[in-house]
Image: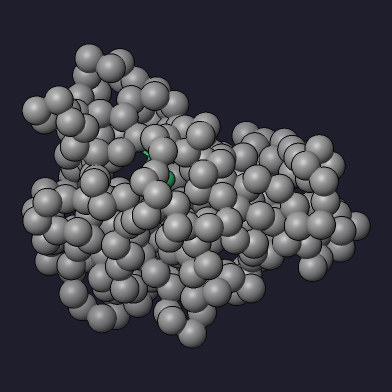
Amino acid sequence: MEIRPLKSFGIEVIGVDLSHTQDPEAVAYMHQLWADNGLLLFRNQRLEECEVIRFSRLFGELEIHVREEYLSPNHPELLIVSNVKKNGKPIGILSDHEVGWHHDQIYLPRPAVGSLLYSVKIPDSGGNTAFCDQAGAYEALPVSKKRELEGVRAVHSYEYFNRQWSEPTSEMQKKRTPDVTHPLVRTHPISGRQAIYADPGMTSGIEGMNKADGHAFLNELYDWCLQPQFLYEHKWRLGDAVMWDNASTMHRRGEFDPNAERIMKRTTILPPPQMAVPI
Ligand code: OGA
Ligand code: MN
């Protein structure tokens, strides 16, 4: 196994076939690498659905996503992200439009710590996924700002995200995803690093602040996070698997030609149960 840094964060792992990985030492090494660097990229994979699931499970239990209409028919651990329609019905979520900055599942009381996205069909151009290193952004803040963030809690809402970037949920799904609050600075369950834990897509406000003040406070933080030194934009190739860390990074997707087809398969990885609630 060889590793190559992508930017100031993110690592490409070379020489690993995800369909065969099982050596506990190699897995432990990758787990630490992932937690410390925010994102792992594996290129040139050829994976069956069950192999994507098996590999993902080496890093934690998998969440079954609340959008059951977009789960793989044979493997509910896989969420399909796609603009392809079959018999007039979308096979996946997020279609071909822009998807703004977000953390997967920040809106749950016990949010996922990671996601693995595997590319099955991609357009010739567009549909890139950008990542923002919010641990690096936090570390670079002046001490006075870090103090200001201590004890602050942010409010997260799946509805807020769906109104901006996705489709409405059913009444049942709404009941399963009420708004939640988490600390605005999250300590990573494995690396112990602290990161800004809020995003423009899903964070609807700051606890105890009115809407306008909350948004102003958050927007200033986002401007800081979205500086080029904290960003990596991934241009997908067929067979790429990107496993990102949802505790220390947020991501967004660019739009692409609606006439092109894009199919991605995603698992959502939970932290160890004793570390399930963000601190
Ligand atoms: C996701 C997501 C972006 C993409 O699967 O959580 O945000 O590039 N996908 O499709
Ligand atoms: Mn996402």
Pick the front one: 125 or 3:
125
Q: In the displayed image of the protein, which residue is found farthest to the right?
A: 144
Q: Number of labelled discs? A: 0
Q: Say whether residue 219 is left or right of residue 144.
A: left
Left or right position of 1 against 73 = right
Residue 183 showing in the rendered view: yes
Q: Quadrant of residue 52?
A: bottom left
Q: Residue at x 33, y 25 (%)?
A: 96
Task: Look at the image and tell me whether residue 252 can be seen.
Answer: no
Check the picture and name the quadrant holding the C terminus.
Answer: bottom right
- Of all residues, the one furthest to the front in this rendering is 171
- Find residue 244 and report its horizontal and vertical position in percent: 42, 54
Q: How is the image coloured?
A: one colour
Residue 212 rendering spot, x and y as whole percentages: 81, 38
Q: Which residue, as the protein is rendered here, is positioned at the far bottom?
A: 274
| Quadrant housing the N terminus | bottom left
Judge from the rendering whether residue 93 lies leftward or rightward of residue 234; answer left or right.
left
Q: Where is residue 30 drawn, in percent x and y?
A: 35, 68
For residue 267, what is the image quadrant? bottom left
Q: Is residue 207 above or below residue 204?
A: below
Query: For the point 62% across and 40% down, which residue is it?
Result: 200
Ligand 1 lies in quarter:
top left
Q: Which residue appears at 85% of the width and 54% of the height? A: 145
Q: Is residue 74 above or below residue 188?
A: above
Residue 71 position, x and y percent, is: 22, 51
Q: Nearer the viewer, residue 204 or 79?
A: 204
Give me the residue at 65% from left, 45% from top.
204
